[in-house]
Amino acid sequence: MANEKNDAQQEQLSSDASKKNNNSKSGGGALIVLLCIVLIAAGTGLIYKDVSRNYRHGIYRCEDGRMMEEPAEPDSGKMRLAADYINGLAGSYPGVKQYMMLVPSAACIQSGYLPDGARIRDQRSDLLQIRGIMPQNLQWIDLMEVFSNHTGEKLYYASDIYLTGWGSRYAAKTAIEAMGAEIPEGKDKCYLLSNSFSGRLAKDKVPSLELFKNTPGERLEVYVPEEEASYYRVDADKGGWSGSLYDSAAAKGKDAYKVFFGGEKALTEIHTTAINGETLLVVGDRTADSIVPLFVSSFENIVLMHPSKCTRTIDSLIKKYNVTKVLYLYGANEFMTDRALLRSFRQ
């Protein structure tokens, strides 16, 4: 009887332990489920907060899907050095006229599209200060008024910092008139190079933005005058020539903006049938690439120099090509911070 009683007690103890173990497992499973729910909720909240952010990495994200780069603070020391070098060139080459055209950023011209509460640097004021620093023998070509009169138009790409074909037309016409060159007659033809252009501002690697705010493709197009002069271009740095200023294959690549000249070249020569004895040296960044093609009917020769790629000096190029005009053509943000231009002045 004693043995039977002990067996019954052991069975009862075993049953109680089993129940406790099952209850423990059940409680642990519930805790795991609760933790998963909390983590999912927190992750969803972070993703929503991430997606809803209207400023990241110096880029403003507007409600209509466009992106705008934050205006940069000018490097005042660089501005004054550039002014000194430009003044020095004017003294060495009094017959060569020098011009400067800085393309204001989209956030400056189309600030009405910025998110509510966005406070940006006053680039208009910065450009006026730069203009005041530059020597009197440099003619300033002002795009501020021209662009301000067309703020509602598609001047800039929604996913990049550069001018669209439409914006480039305004800039080119303003520059040609200011330099006293002839504007080609007739209408401009529009050529669509890509209907799915996505610029560098859209290449944000944040997964949530890629998933929930994917910027739709844009039209990458160029405008060509009906009466455009014939021309050919030469890659003066690597050699080779082409009968076109555009690389249509590049429009389908990752960096579709390379459609202009096949990408940023150190030095490009453009020889045209616009026989007028004028040789224009354009010194600039990639902003210039979409504007320079519209100069071909206004100058006999054009030399496009990118100081970020080119090791030659402006002085040597003026001598080599018998330059009659020099145009410094930059995006305002790039000009205010980049120091490559200073290297191109040094002997």
Image (cartoon, grey):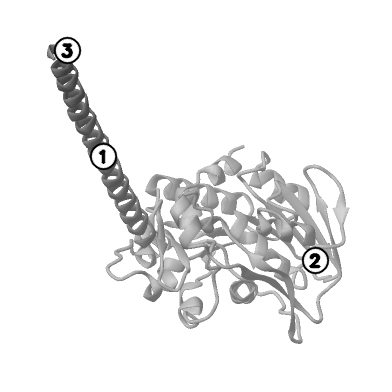
Q: Quadrant of the N terminus?
A: top left
Nearest the camera: 17 or 328?
17
What secondary structure is found at the residue carrying circle 2? loop
Give the amino acid type for the residue marked by disc 1 in the picture.
Ser
In percent of width and height, residue 347 lies at 62, 37
In percent of width and height, residue 327 lies at 62, 60
Q: Mark 1 highlights which residue?
A: 26
Give the amino acid type for the residue marked by disc 3 in the picture.
Asn
In percent of width and height, residue 129 lies at 37, 61
Q: Mark 2 highlights which residue?
A: 300
> How many circles with numbers are drawn on the protein?
3
Above or below 277: residue 191: below
Which residue of the protein is positioned furthest toward the front in this rendering?
1
Q: Residue at x 81, y 76 (%)?
A: 228
Q: Mark 3 highlights which residue?
A: 3
Nearest the camera: 155 or 266?
155
Q: CA distance from mark 3 to mark 1?
A: 34 Å
Above or below 259: residue 66: below
What secondary structure is found at the residue carrying circle 3? helix
Residue 97 visible in the shown view = no
What secondary structure is found at the residue carrying circle 1? helix
Q: Residue at x 19, y 31 (%)?
A: 20
The 10 Å Cα crowd at callout 3, few under 14, some 14 to 19, many 20 or more, is few
